[in-house]
Amino acid sequence: MLLKASMTDFAYSTHAHEEYSIGVTLSGRQDFYTQGAFHKSHPGQIMVFNPGDAHDGESGEDTALTYSMLYIHPQQLAPYLDALNVHSPEQFRIQDAVFSDLAVQDKILRLARLIELKTGTSSEYESLLFELSEQLVRYQSNQPLFAESRRQQLLERTKDCLQDHYQDEVSLDDLCQVACMSKYHFLRCFKAYTGMTPHQYWLNVRIHRGQQALRSGVPVLDVVSELGFNDLSHFNRRFKPVFGMTPRQYQQLILAR
């Protein structure tokens, strides 16, 4: 998936994606917080958010911020990583949130053009994605995606619980039982682990379930009903701060491709 965006006074709320989000800042400056630090992406620089990396985002200057962002699902990337001899492709992470690399920039923009113009063959697309993967492997993080400690295993269980019950909010007391932690200890550990509070994480899961339904062509009002939002206005208010457009605009953009 490709997203091309331009903004001046808009800000993304804290959220995370299930895909690798890999893009290039074209003009202006994007400021965001992720992985425990503030970052600034200037024109020509690469921005990367690994799956699950909580982040926000806003224009850092008065001039318009424009960028192109690719969203690549881990399952889509895994065969290329495996071919490149990456150990445990499902745990592959890119270390730097912002960096400069002309070769990576070239591959991203060429892929973006191929998707936007819809003129390339599947062979061209797959070849470019392999070449991009080849470049990104150089920035692989040594930090595993899933840690092995008992605490982190329990936090993964609470994430699974929130994902399984995205239509109905799970109580904080129930989550604490799953995590085997006291309430305030759990809140502190969950925020440190995911970058979001349990409530923010649950909302993020719901929005991404909605995104998947919209991409598959489910009517917007049916998505509102399935996700349990009060009405379309409520869904709009939750969706737009994450994707920069309303659900209807998003679906029209995706289905037109």
Image: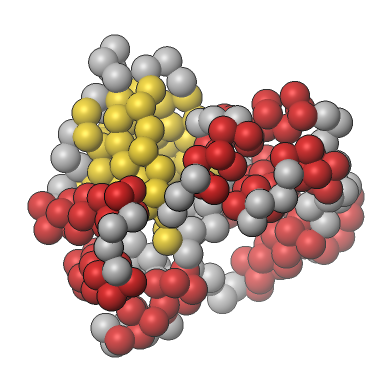
- Residue 170 appears left or right of 201: right
Q: Residue at x 79, y 52 (%)?
A: 166
Furthest residue to the left?
102
Q: Which one is nearer the viewer's eye here, 108 or 58?
A: 108
Examine the rendering and report whether any part of residue 158 can be seen.
no
**Colour scheme in use:** secondary structure
Closer to us: 173 or 120: 120
Q: Is residue 100 visible?
A: yes
Viewer-closest of 110 and 7: 110
Where residue 154 sits in the image (x, y, percent)?
A: 71, 67
Q: How many marks?
A: 0
Position of residue 242 measured from the top left corner of the image (x, y, whole percent):
55, 36
Task: Work out whether 17 lies above or below 39.
Answer: below
Query: Relative to residue 95, is residue 124 depicted above or below?
Result: below
Relative placement, left or right, of 198 versus 253 is right
Query: Horizontal and vertical percent for residue 77?
Result: 40, 72
Query: Observer-nearest residue: 172 or 160?
Result: 160
User: Which residue shows up at 27% across the image and 63% down it?
Assistant: 120
Q: Position of residue 160 (x, y in %)?
A: 73, 64
The picture quadrant where one finds residue 138 is bottom left
- Residue depicted at 73% across the width and 44% down the height: 219
Picture layout, residue 28 above or below residue 135: above
At horizontal 49% and vertical 73% (from top left) the residue drawn is 75
Q: Quadrant of the N terminus?
A: bottom left
